[in-house]
Amino acid sequence: MANLTRWNPFAELEEMLDRYSRGAGFPRLGNDRETRDLMRRTDWSPAVDIAETPTAYVISAELPGIDRKDVKVTVNDGVLLIQGERHSEKEDKDRKHHRVERFYGTFARSFSLPDNVNEDSIQADYKDGMLKVTLEKSEKAKPKSIEVQVN
C-alpha cells in the first residue's frame, strides 16, 4: 500500500522562488540553514499584512484557533521569525468528517527587517486569533559634516 503525502502548494511555490532567487543572485528571507530547514518542514503558512506608519512597521498575522502558548516570535540577525502550531481537533468516533479545509500542524514565516528597525523595542500582542507585531523605527543617523582642512 502506498503512503499518501499531503500536497502543499505553498511549499512548492517557496521552493520555486528559492531556486529563482538563487539563480538571479538575490538573497532570500531567512537565509540561515536553520530557518530554511524550518520553513521547509512547515505544514501551512498564515496570511500576513505588513503596514508602515511614520514611527513603526506593523505585521498582522491571522492565527485563528491557535493558543497563545503555541506561537513564538523571535528576532535573530535582522530576521523576524513567527512560528507555531495549530493542533487538530481530537478524533471523535461518532463524527464523520465530509470535508476538512483548515490547515493543521506547524507554521513559520520569516521577514528580513529593514535597517531602521529598533530590535530592542519590538512588541507582539495576540488577541482573538490575530498576532500584531510592532517594529518601532529607530531614529535615522543624522548626516555628519566634516570640514576638510587644506594645507
Image (spheres, rainbow, N blue to C red):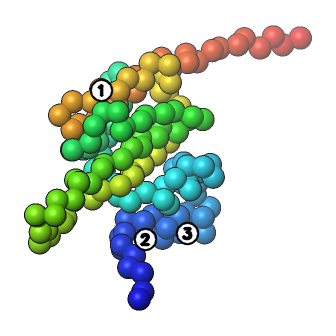
Q: Amino acid at mark 3?
A: Arg
Q: Earlier in the sequence, mark 1 or mark 2?
A: 2
Residue at the image position 40 percent from the left and 76 percent from the top: 5
Q: Amino acid at mark 1?
A: Asp
Determine whether 144 is above or below 45 in the image.
above
Nearer to us in this view, 115 or 9: 9
Nearer to us in this view, 49 or 147: 49
5 lies left or right of 99: right
Q: In what element is the residue under mark 1? A: strand
Q: In this rendering, which labeled residue sits more in front, label 3 or label 1?
A: 1
79 lies left or right of 73: right
Q: In what element is the residue under mark 2? A: helix
Residue 125: mark: 1
Residue position for label 3 = 19
Determine whether 45 is above or below 143 in the image.
below
Quadrant housing the C terminus: top right
Q: In what element is the residue under mark 3? A: helix
In the image as oriented, which residue stretches furthest toward the front? 93
Residue 43, position in %: x, y?
Answer: 38, 60
Quadrant housing the N terminus: bottom left
Residue position for label 2 = 12
In the image as oriented, which residue stretches furthest toward the bottom? 1
Tell me the distance, in whole angstroms, between the alpha carbons under discs 2 and 3: 11 Å
Tell me the distance, in whole angstroms, between the alpha carbons under discs 1 and 2: 31 Å
Q: Residues within 10 Å of mark 3 (few under 14, many from 20)?
A: few
Residue 88, position in %: x, y?
Answer: 27, 54
Q: Earlier in the sequence, mark 3 or mark 1?
A: 3
Q: Is residue 137 visible?
A: no
